[in-house]
Image: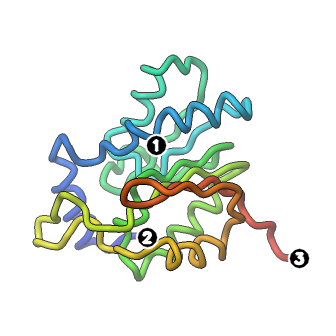
């Protein structure tokens, strides 16, 4: 399980806000660079929201790519799908702490080659309907990295204003 029914209801309500779930717009150029540098053309968007990443990549001129959206707030997208590039943009800080490891396991399962993850480490500008800050995990990169490194090797990490992004590869399965 990766989300409680109660929190899923909170997320569905928050997604009614047109300004919620727009972070992927600013990170799409980095995803485009990854596609251009690697030649990989399958993208799984974990926590896709309103599929802004797909829209922005098309706007930036990316023509041929396979895109798989997953977001529990949008059940019509279906289940998480494996792809060469797994993107998880402005999602992990929204995960209930109890389910973080399950989400990271999900991401490992769908990351065929490269993962691109962004994490905001402070409070969000939005609140959940129950009054909590939308970023329910507000921890520094030093807290996040051990969680991520249980499942992935970090190839690149860049600090941002308020957080960081990383490029990861799945750790090999133990024999």
Residue at disc 1, secondary structure: strand
**For this view, does 54 lie left or right of residue 155?**
left
105 to 116, vertically: above or below: below
What is the distance, in whole Å, between disc 2 and disc 3 at their CAs? Answer: 26 Å
In the picture, residue 53 is in which quadrant?
A: top left
Mark 1 = which residue? 69
Mark 2 = which residue? 2
Residue at disc 3, secondary structure: loop
Mark 3 = which residue? 175
Q: Residue at x 80, y 66 (%)?
A: 172
96 to 106, vertically: above or below: below
Colour scheme in the image? rainbow
| Callout 3 touching callout 1 (CB < 8 Å) | no
**For this view, does 153 lie left or right of residue 86?**
right
Residue 82, how many percent across, how many down? 63, 49
Q: Residues within 10 Å of mark 2 (few under 14, many from 20)?
A: some
């Amino acid at each position: 399980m990766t989300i409680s029914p109660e929190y899923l209801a909170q997320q569905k309500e928050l997604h009614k806000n047109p300004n919620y779930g727009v972070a992927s717009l600013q990170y799409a150029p980095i995803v485009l660079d990854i596609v251009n540098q690697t030649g990989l053309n399958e993208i799984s968007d974990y926590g896709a929201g309103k599929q802004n990443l797909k829209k922005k990549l098309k706007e930036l001129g990316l023509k041929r790519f396979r895109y798989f959206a997953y977001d529990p707030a949008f059940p019509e997208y279906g289940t998480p799908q494996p792809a060469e590039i797994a993107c998880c943009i402005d999602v992990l800080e929204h995960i209930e702490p109890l389910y973080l490891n399950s989400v990271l396991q999900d991401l490992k399962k769908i990351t065929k080659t490269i993962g691109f993850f962004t994490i905001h480490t402070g409070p969000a500008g939005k609140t959940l309907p129950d009054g909590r800050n939308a970023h329910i995990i507000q921890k520094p990169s030093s807290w996040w990295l051990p969680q991520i490194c249980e499942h992935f090797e970090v190839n690149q990490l860049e600090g941002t204003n308020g957080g960081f992004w990383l490029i990861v590869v799945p750790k090999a399965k133990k024999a």
